[in-house]
Amino acid sequence: MSEFRFLHAADIHLDSPMRGLEADPDAPVALIRDASRATFRNLIDLAIDERVAFVLIAGDLYDGDWKDWRTGLFFTEQAARLAEAGIWLLLIAGNHDAASIITRNLRLPQHITLFPHEESGQLVLEEHGVAVYGQSFATRAVTHDLTRNYPKALPGLFNIGLLHTSLTGRPGHENYAPTTPDALIAREYDYWALGHVHAREVVHEDPWIVFPGNLQGRQIRESGPKGATLVTVSDGRVARVEHRILDVFRWCSIEVPVADDRDLDSALERIANALSTSLQAADGRPIAARITLTGATPLHEQLITEAERVRQGVIAEGRQHGIDAVWIESVVIGTTSAADFGSLATRPDVAGRLTKVLDELAGGACTDFLGDYPGRLRDRIPEGALPAEHPLHDRVALLTRARELVLANLLGDV
Amino acid sequence: MRLTSFTLEKYGNFASAKLALDPRPGCINLVVGPNGGGKTVLRQAFHDLLFGIPGQTPMAFLYGYQGMHLAAEGIDASGAPFAFARRKGIGNTLVDAAGNGLDPIVLTRLIGEADEALFERLFGLDSHLLRSGAEAIFASGGHLAEALFAAGSGIASVRRLRESFEKKRDELAPSRQAKSKPFYQALDKLTGAYRELHRATVRPRDWQDLKVKVEFTRDRRASLTSQQAQIRTDIERLQRIKRVRPWLDQRQDLQRRCEAVADAPRLPSDTEERWRKAQQGVEVAEREMTAAGDALRTLADALAGEQPDERVLKQGPLIEDIERAQNQIASDQRDLPRREAERRMAATRIDNALAALGRRTFDEIAAIIPNGPQIAAGRDLVKKHGVLTERRERAAAEAAKHSLAIAAAENELDRIGEPSDISDLAALVREVRAEGEPRRRLSALQTKLAAEDARLAAALAKVPLWDQGLEALVALIPPSREMIDRAAATLATSANEVNEAQREVERLRGGRIETVEARNEARQGRPVPDAAAVAAARSHRDHGWSLIRRSKFEGERLEMEIATYSAPRGLVAAFENAVSTADDVADRREEESTRLAKIASLDGTIDKLDARIVAADERLAEPRRLHEEALRNWKGLARPLGFDDATEPTDLRDFLTAREALLDARSAREAAHQALTLEAAEQEAVRLRFVRLMLQDEPGSLSQAVAVAEQVIERSTELRLERDRIETELQTFRRLHRQAEDDEGAVRRALETWQEAWRECLTKLRRPADDTPAGLERAIELIEEAHRENQRLVDLDHRVSGMRGNIATFESKVTALVSGVAPDLDGQPIDIAAGALRRRLDASRTIEARRDQLLSQQNQAMLRNAQAEAKERRAVAERESLREEIGAGSDEEIISRIEKATERARAEARLEECERELAKISDGWAIHAVEQEVSGVPVETVEPELARLQLDFDRLTTDREQAAVEERSLAEELRRIETGENALTAEESRQSAIACVTRISADALLYHAAACLLQAGLERLRGSGDEGLLGRIGTVFARITGGAYSGVLADEDDKGIPYLIAIEADGTTTKRVQQLSEGTRDQLFLALRIVMLEDYAAKAPALPFIADDLLQTFDDYGRTANALTALADLSQHVQVILLSHHRQLIEVAGTLPANTVHFCELPAVDAGLAGAMS
């Protein structure tokens, strides 16, 4: 019985930075800085340990706007390890690679094949009975279905399609090289190795259509375990598909309900427990956590008015797990007030009328009363630096939070 | 809600208390009690009544939770009575008078949406809160919106809050750039990180260029190294020759010298030194031996002079004991007389006490123990007697007082009599009031009808193009909007198509004109040379070339021909002219052919345009026909409405819209008319019901009927309330009278029991049967005094005997010692003899210590003497042994042999050293090989050759070093580039700076938005307020200040923000809040609060206003009276309950009109309890 294995990875974004983490002298800076390289090393180690026949990278090996040549040198150094072990590395350029200066200048060593962007390419590995097809992105934005150019499956071989695509569209990802699962199935390949979507997803089985997700989460939206897909092929059929976790640093978005807590210490204890659970789930990896406090609670007013104290308290709780273990990305006060501000707004006294007026102001379209401060602030910040959800971009959310802050301070116990 | 009574059971310091309150509008309830007398408890009780008694309450400090109960009775806003109570417990604690659970909705109906905070902040006020509110107004400079908010919400910190938001914002990210602020620091970091990232990023081309440079430099350095190695080999050979040549000469010389001293002895090289040291060793040992003997003798002499007193030394411990006891004995001798005197006085006091008790000896009272049960029982009985006596007197006084009060209340009830039943009338008034004020309702409907009439007239006026009146317009049947739209659209489309076709014709005609102009222009031009002219020009040119060729290259003499051809310019110039002319003629022929082709092409274009113009003219006819048809259709729509043919579609659409608005207005007007008619009929029916119920003069309108009915109800209600109050008081007085009588009986029974115990006690204490409590109290004191003094007497006896024994023992010890060791002291006083003994002991011990030290030194000296003798013997033996080793007898012979041996050894050593040096400097070559190499090179050639080679070598060294430095630098740069993480580090800094900027800017923006929102909210709140608010505030302020100020106004500052100003009595002088005195600001804040309370009461069910010692800052009589008047006015809207510990308020209240103040006094509280409460 003939059997071989291969590794399928995508969206490695070598040397892409972690986003949203503030400087912290106690944080594992070196580990975080080296995270994307370390996970790539893990990928190469896994390939060698598992003695795979080849490794597939379905696009976005680099970041398009990253120009440092050392990233390319690091890649060739690691690829050489594969070559020494006699393992092929087959890859396509995705939307980020296409624009990468590194891709354009790097001379690839032997045993590495980058599929062309002018048309679909094909590589037959005779010793394993495998045919791999792929086409790179020519430019950053490819908006047509690339699979129309992919050839029909070769009979008698195990056929693999390598494709960077958003398929029918995935939230948070540009709609590049769109296609449908049916169109892929129609090619009669045995395995479609996809890339571009950073969350792991098995779209279809027999034939297998798989997004492995990215190797290492880089921001809070990319939370949870990350890695590559190890595929075992036996007698020309997929026998096993396994997800192997390779990340070295874990992003955790943690919701902590504090409705039942009567004081801040109690809430902090609950947060500490949640952090502990996430840390255990990360199997010894350091974590970066976004703590979102939820629930209708009498603590809401205190949480709002003492937000910085709460943030420091959460950071201190995180630090109790060891200075290299937990990094707090942010603390989001998502609680609501236990006080009934709704009925307060119907009361005829001054406090009730002020509440009603604040509701109107916060919900109104006119924000002239904010003056020119927001504009001045925006002018000082480099364009594109702020995330989309920043209050400078969302006046409604800003005024809603400001209203809560005012009421919490002024009428918290009205 | 207004309360008529409030009852507290086992609450705070009140076992049971009931306050009777007056609910009448215009009446203040003044509750007076001493400081700590329960006002705070009462205030908390109001709170707990409305919102429940907390699970843990300090109000249980006296009676516990069991039986804690609060109850209230009163009337609601419609005058209907209510009663409810609050029990201590969990869950729904609201109960009715019988203790049954009540639905909380009952309370909600009375107090509306009011909650605890509203009760505390709006309906509660004390002097502290009054002052805080006044200070907030002062701090804001009288800012109108903030003042209203502070007064109406009880929250005085709104300005501080806004300022704190702005402060927090500016601490993070002030609008003006400040390097020290976190936002700008983060921005700096971000900018730095961008710069660093740009600097640290390695581009592919940079790296490739660097790699090429490294390889080139490496190759060059390798080449230089190879050349240098060859030169180095040659230099080393010549240097070796130069180096070894002198050593080879020296070696020959030393070989000859060794042969000359070959017969000298061989001795070790250190022989001379060893001989000298042996001689010195013998001399030193002899000197040390002599010195040791001298020291031994000196010590023996010193020992003979040191002899201590051995007897004294032997008794040393005993002498030391005596010295230690000496101080104690002196103290005993000093104290003994005083203690004896004290003993005598104690005995005297015992005798006196016994005599006062009528006893002769202490034994007679010894059995009665102080603090024993007999004494304690006696004391208890004395104390109990006092308490019972006082209680009996108080109960009798209370019973008498309450009897008088009961009689007065019964008389008052008889005077008032029973009020009539007004329930039906009240129900009818409520029914009418529930629907609003009748006259206002009727007036509103009339106003609405007038408004609808005006709206109808306006709608008619707005109908365009119409002058035929309302009814004609209503009767008109206009075309539908769809028909108009369709006809208008067809008309517009056909007009567009006509215009389009017309434009096409004009465009083609314009094109034809341009083409004709272009063709005419092409036809104009210079005359064109014919073919012969071209051939002639070319022939002339060729002839010139022929002349040049033949004259210059073939040597023909053609002067004549040349002169003919070229005169007067010369052959070359003439030839150049001929070439130019031939080219020009040929070019003109070429241009002409092009021009002719263009003219032909333009003629063709004109023909095509003519054909297209004809076709376009034909195509124009159809759109024109369609347009005319559409126009006819449009006129068919407009004319039936009476409009002319020029009416635009827009006009027709506007007409339809205005007509529809008019029809709506007409319908609304009809509805308003019907509503008015209906309301008038209903009011008349109700008025007749009032007439039937009141049986009085018939009122003219329903409003008048309601007003008369309300007066009747009010009078009846007042009477009922007064009766209720007096009955409540009567019940209370009767209950208190019963309690006083019960208490008196209880005291009487307690005194009888006491008498039995008293008799038994006197017997046990052996006192006469007729002894009084005072007599017994004195006897107990005497018995206790006798016991105390007896105990003291026993103690003093023991002390005196101890002192005497100590002194005797001491004296006997000293006497015995003197006789044993110092008989010469016999007869001296004891203390002098003891001191002398001590001094003799010290002297003997000093001598003994010195002698011990000398003995120790003598032993050491003897040891050193023996060591010196042994050392001297060893030194002599070593010297003689060396003498034999050298092989000579006398000292002079020994020195001679040593000198010869030294000379031989030195010569051999130098030869050996020379050969060693040769081996070292000849690069490993054998000496004979070196000799051969040296012999082959003449001495005089070595230096010049070396100099030449060295110059070459140095040059190569410089080049190679430069190459090496360059290579190292480039390689290091390449290594740094390949392994560095600078770009990653910079990117990480950039990301962290972005995160920091994001967070800080978001926080700062939030604080900014909160500050702006609060400010805008307050302004809008003020703007949306009642127009007459300022006037009402001014009226109340004038009332409180007794006319010192006539009102308030709002003025605006530079930013247009309104602020309060006070108007003085003259009506013109104004003062800002900052100019008012502290007391006047208090009055202003009170005025604001009163108006806010009135405002609230007009919109929702109001709670009683509880003012706690509110007027204690109103420090004069007039101010207090004015404030009470204003509060009385307030009580028209809400019930006012004023708590105070200032009894003079009663006096001030007495100056107000009758029935303005209802006085209540809190029950007296035990002083101890008052302390616990405060």
Image (cartoon, coloured by chain):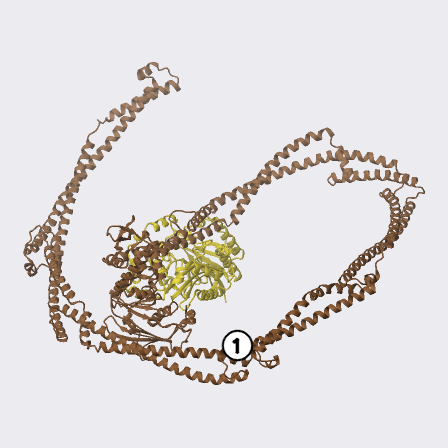
Chain colours: A yellow, B brown
The one of A40 and B722 positioned closer to us in this rendering: B722
Residue B303 sits in quarter? bottom right
Please state which amino acid type lies under the numbered disc 1.
Answer: Arg
Residue, far right:
B889
**Up-down relation of residue B429 to residue A331 (above or below):** below
Q: Chain of mark 1?
A: B
Residue A190 sits in quarter? bottom left
Note whether residue B1088 is visible: yes
x 94%, y 43%: residue:
B889
Image location of residue B614, percent across then percent down? 13, 43
Image location of residue A259, percent across then percent down? 40, 68
What element does badge 1 sit on?
A: helix
Give the quadrant of the N terminus of chain B.
bottom left
The one of B195 and B1012 positioned closer to us in this rendering: B1012
Give the quadrant of the C terminus of chain B.
bottom left
Local packing at callout 1 (Cα closer than 10 Å; few below 14, some 14-19, many 20+) is few
The one of B680 and B337 positioned closer to us in this rendering: B337
Image location of residue A258, percent across then percent down? 41, 66
Image location of residue B620, percent across then percent down? 12, 47
Give the residue number, with chain letter if any, for mark 1. Answer: B778
Residue, far top:
B560
Whether residue B1068 sits left or right of residue A395 in the image: it is: left
Whether residue B524 sits left or right of residue B1061 in the image: it is: left
